[in-house]
């Protein structure tokens, strides 16, 4: 378990907090590209790491991300006019370009130099993989832009989405890195639960190996004469890649794909979950319609999400739990893997008290992740770059999901499975 001080150290994300300063050394998702579909279109509210911001796509198609309030009298710039490569506050007409420079100040005399002395807070952006990324740290430590494999996949072979979770980012991240719960929480049918017939098939043997970007970790389960090997990748600070490539239980007709998530702190008790799926084999692209079907199956389809990207199934309606189905069909009585995760993670409270935990052997990946986050906070406090900021360290990694014979070493049997192909 963590001490109270350590728990707050990894959970709090505001400016000036240890974890908040560490997170500001990474490129983080700010919004989806689909939220800014057109040049000079409507601005979008963004809240990230406790800061209120406004994103807009200017006349050149480039994206700006600026303070949500005009530096003049702190009027909300969300209502501003997006025009001629800048966002103009409608209160007194002050206009700012995407770099934060004030380019027009009609409320001052024409010969005034005041506008050259005023700037609005602005953060650099990078658009890739259907996501608008931003860097909120010191300019002198700006790393190279993110280069995940899904950012290089053609748009027609990739689906990117997001949804809101009402809990701290770390407990949401921990849910993604927890391999042990998959065969229990997400069992689609009580009769399918492996541990009812064979407890050994339920309990994963975990291997965790630190890397320059975070770690890879493997959950290995014994299924008769075969080993079910699931290799996950954790890229700091908040990205998980899940193996569904040559999936152990896929039908032969199913095409290989890769899934992943990025958990981005809105503030201390709210999180954006960015979800992505993409074709694993360039020669066998997964149809976009199939990716959409899977998104719906996971509980993130258009009918499951409100216009503000919050889930319709939430704490106020108990995630539409069906107690009859819980007894006869679905282990949780909650439809959709994504919704099941949200119910448990949000149900812990806005920020869980980790001093009351009792961790077991299946929590090795979570323990290691917490240690890495604490180390990242220490590194930034010491003026050093934290682990995972260099995209060359993670650009070629991917997860895996395979059945191999008992007695074989997965690293020797399927070494090519964890290497990017795009």
Image: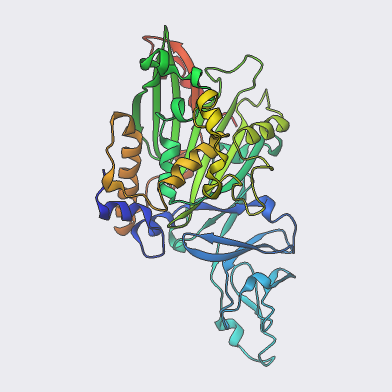
Q: At 58% across and 61% down in the image, what residue appears?
A: 46
Residue 103 or 266: which is nearer the viewer?
Answer: 266
Q: Quadrant of the C terminus?
A: top right
Dividing the picture into quadrants, the one containing residue 176 is: top left
The answer to whether 258 appears left or right of 155 in the picture is left
Residue 121: % across, % down = 53, 71
The answer to whether 262 appears left or right of 212 in the picture is right
Q: Relative to 277, say whether 8 is above or below.
A: below
Residue 283 or 66: which is nearer the viewer?
Answer: 66
Report the residue that reaches farthest toward the left: 3
Residue 204: % across, % down = 37, 23
Q: Relative to 391, say whether 8 is above or below.
A: below
Residue 234: tell me if it is visible. Answer: no
Q: At 44% across and 27% down in the image, what residue appears?
A: 184
Residue 84: % across, % down = 75, 70
Residue 166 or 273: which is nearer the viewer?
Answer: 166
Which colour scheme appears in the figure?
rainbow
Q: Relative to 61, say whether 375 is above or below.
A: above
Q: Quadrant of the N terminus?
A: top left
Residue 397: % across, % down = 49, 32
Residue 269 or 372: which is nearer the viewer?
Answer: 269
Report the residue that reaches farthest toward the front: 324
The answer to whether 62 appears left or right of 313 in the picture is right
């Amino acid at each position: 378990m963590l001490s109270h001080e350590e728990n707050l150290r990894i959970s709090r994300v505001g400016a000036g907090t240890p974890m908040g300063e560490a997170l500001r050394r990474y490129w983080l998702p700010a919004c989806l590209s689909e939220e800014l579909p057109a040049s000079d279109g409507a601005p979008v509210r963004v809240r990230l790491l406790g800061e209120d911001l406004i994103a807009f796509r200017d006349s050149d198609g480039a994206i700006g991300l600026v303070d949500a309030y005009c530096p003049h009298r702190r009027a909300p710039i969300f209502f501003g006019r997006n025009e001629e490569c800048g966002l103009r506050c409608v209160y007194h007409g002050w206009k700012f370009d995407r770099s934060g420079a004030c380019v027009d100040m009609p409320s001052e005399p024409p010969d005034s130099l005041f506008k050259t002395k005023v700037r609005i807070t602005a953060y650099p952006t990078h658009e890739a993989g259907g996501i608008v990324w931003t860097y909120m740290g010191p300019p002198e430590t700006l790393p190279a832009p993110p280069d995940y494999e899904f950012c290089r996949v053609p748009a027609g072979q990739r689906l990117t989405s997001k949804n809101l979770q009402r809990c701290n980012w770390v407990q949401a991240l921990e849910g993604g890195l927890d391999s042990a719960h998959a065969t229990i929480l997400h069992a689609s049918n009580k009769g399918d639960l492996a541990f009812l017939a064979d407890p050994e098939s339920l309990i994963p043997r975990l291997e965790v190996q630190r890397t320059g970007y975070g770690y890879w970790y493997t959950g290995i389960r014994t299924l008769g004469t075969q080993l079910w090997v699931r290799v996950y990748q954790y890229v700091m600070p908040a990205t998980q890649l899940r193996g569904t490539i040559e999936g152990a239980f896929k039908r032969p007709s199913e095409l290989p794909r890769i899934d992943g998530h990025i958990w981005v702190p809105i503030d201390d008790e709210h999180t954006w979950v960015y979800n992505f799926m993409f074709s694993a084999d360039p020669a066998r692209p997964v149809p976009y319609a199939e990716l959409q079907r899977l998104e719906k199956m996971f509980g993130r389809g258009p009918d499951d999400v409100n216009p503000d990207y919050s889930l319709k199934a939430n704490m106020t309606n108990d995630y539409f739990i069906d107690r009859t189905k819980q007894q006869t069909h679905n282990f949780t009585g909650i439809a959709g893997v994504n919704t099941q995760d949200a119910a448990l993670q949000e149900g812990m409270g806005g920020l869980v008290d980790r001093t009351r935990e009792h961790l077991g052997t299946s929590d090795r990946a979570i323990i290691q992740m917490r240690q890495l986050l604490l180390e990242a906070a220490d590194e930034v406090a010491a003026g050093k770059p934290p682990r995972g900021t260099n995209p060359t360290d993670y650009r070629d990694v991917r997860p895996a999901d395979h059945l191999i014979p008992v007695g074989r070493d997965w690293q020797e049997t399927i070494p090519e499975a964890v290497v990017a192909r795009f």
